[in-house]
Image: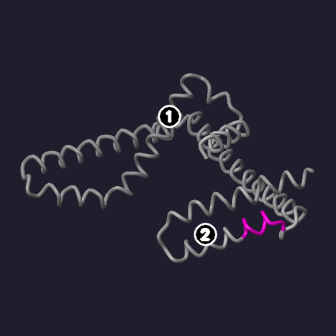
Amino acid sequence: MIPTLLAEIGIPLLARLLREGLERIDHPVAEAAAEGLAAVEGAIGSGDIEAAKLADANRHLETMAAIRSDDYRAALAQVNESLRAEIASDDPYVRRMRPTFDYILAATWAAQMGAVAWAIIADPPAAARVIADMANLSIIWSVGLGVLGVYVYQRSREKIGGASRLSPAAFGDMVLNLARERG
């Protein structure tokens, strides 16, 4: 009974989700992959692929997920440890480096947005070109502003007292739970 249940949940669900996602991509490789996954789903549904083999594949999938989860947990523990070391440092520069970076980043972003707004207002015919040129900077800004957002969010939690009491393992579990909820 358990192999049958596993066979109905793991690989078949993954194959269906991947197929449905790939069907939305207009590309020959994605279409071929979607057709292949549809064939796998058909073979599972008709019983051509045995439940025991599916259960074995699901166990392998679970093992690989556990290994990756352990890797992510170790990486998050290292990041958490380095952040705690920065906060506890006696060196004023080390403690103030992140906030200083964040203030500089926020001021730079505000200055650039002000310059873009001024350029659009001062020369409306050039607005399309200015906006298109801004798109070229989106990756750079997404990284910097993403770092800023994560830092501000995490720092706010530390001030409340919740995050500073988390162990590295609990922090990793929290991130994994959030990923599962949104995933």
Q: Which residues are magenta?
A: 40-47
Q: Residue at x 73, y 67 (%)?
A: 42
> Which callout, 1 or 2, points to the residue nearer the camera?
2
Placement of 129 over or under 31, stated as above or below: above
Name the outermost residue toward the front.
46
Q: Upstream in the sequence, badge 1 or badge 2? A: 2
Q: Amino acid at mark 2?
A: Ala
Percent x, y of residue 52: 90, 62
Residue occupying image coordinates x 68% and y 44%: 77
Q: Which residue is mark 1?
A: 153
Pick the front one: 140 or 61: 61
Callout 2: SS:
helix
Left or right: 125 with respect to 57? left
Q: Residue furthest right?
A: 1
Residue where numbered disc 2 is placed: 34
The secondary structure type at the circle numbered 1 is helix
Q: CA distance from mark 1 to mark 2?
A: 39 Å
Which corner quadrant of the image does residue 30 belong to?
Answer: bottom right
- Mark 1: amino acid: Tyr
Residue 174 in the image: x percent, y percent? 67, 37
Q: With 54 as the anchor, is 19 left or right in this view? A: left
Residue 43 in picture, x, y percent from top left: 77, 69
Q: Is residue 44 magenta?
A: yes
In the foreground, 58 or 76: 58
